[in-house]
Image (cartoon, helix red, strand yellow):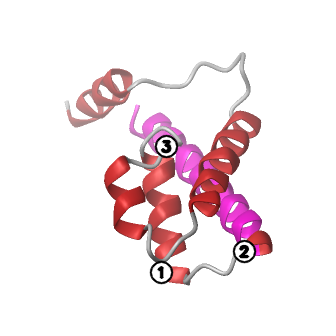
Amino acid sequence: MAEEALEIELRQETEFLAAYDRVVRAVNECFDVRGSDLATLVRCCLDNDNMLSKHHRKQYATRVPEAAMDLIESEARTARAELVPNDAPAPDDESLDDQAEGSRL
C-alpha cells in the first residue's frame, strides 16, 4: 500500500512539474515577468485548480500585466488537460488517506 501511495505521489509531482515548466516557458515567451513573481503565480495557480485568486491578481497587478496572469491560467488549464487523460480517474484525497492509514497498520 505504501508503495502504491508513493507511486501516486510521484506521478502527481511529475505532472505538476511538467505543467509548471510549460506555463513558465509560455509566459516567458510573451512577457518579461520577474522570475520570483512568475514562480509564485504559477505555483498558486496550479495549486488552486488552475485559477489565480483575486487576492493574487490584486497583489501583483502593479508588476505583472493582467494579460500575463490570464495566460498563466490558460496555459495551466491546457497543460493539466494534456497531462491527465480524461479516461483516467484522478485519485481523491480520501483514497490517499486510506492508503496511508493502511500502510501504518
Q: Position of residue 55 (x, y in %)?
A: 31, 54
Q: Are marks 3 and 1 in contact (CB under 8 Å)?
A: no
Q: Is residue 32 above or below residue 22?
A: below
| Nearer-N-terminus badge (1/2) | 2
SS of the residue under disc 2: helix
Q: Which residue is mark 1?
A: 36
Give the Cα separation between the discs numbered 3 and 1: 18 Å
Give the Cα separation between the discs numbered 2 and 3: 19 Å
Q: Quadrant of residue 34?
A: bottom right
SS of the residue under disc 1: helix
SS of the residue under disc 3: loop
Q: Are marks 1 and 2 in contact (CB under 8 Å)?
A: no
Count of all numbered marks drawn on residues in the image: 3
Q: Which residue is mark 2?
A: 28
Packing grade of label 3 (10 A; few <14, some 14-19, many >=20) is: some
Give the Cα separation between the discs numbered 1 and 2: 12 Å
Residue furthest left in the image:
105
Q: Amino acid at mark 3?
A: Met
Q: Which residues are magenta?
A: 1-28
The quadrant of the rendering that contains the C terminus is top left
Q: Residue at x 36, y 60 (%)?
A: 58
Q: Is residue 33 above or below residue 17?
A: below
Q: Quadrant of residue 21?
A: bottom right
> Does residue 12 belong to the magenta stretch?
yes
Packing grade of label 2 (10 A; few <14, some 14-19, many >=20) is: some
Q: Position of residue 57 (x, y in %)?
A: 42, 57
Left or right: where 73 falls relative to 31: left
Q: Which residue is mark 3?
A: 51
Overall secondary structure of the magenta stretch?
helix
Q: Amino acid at mark 1?
A: Ser
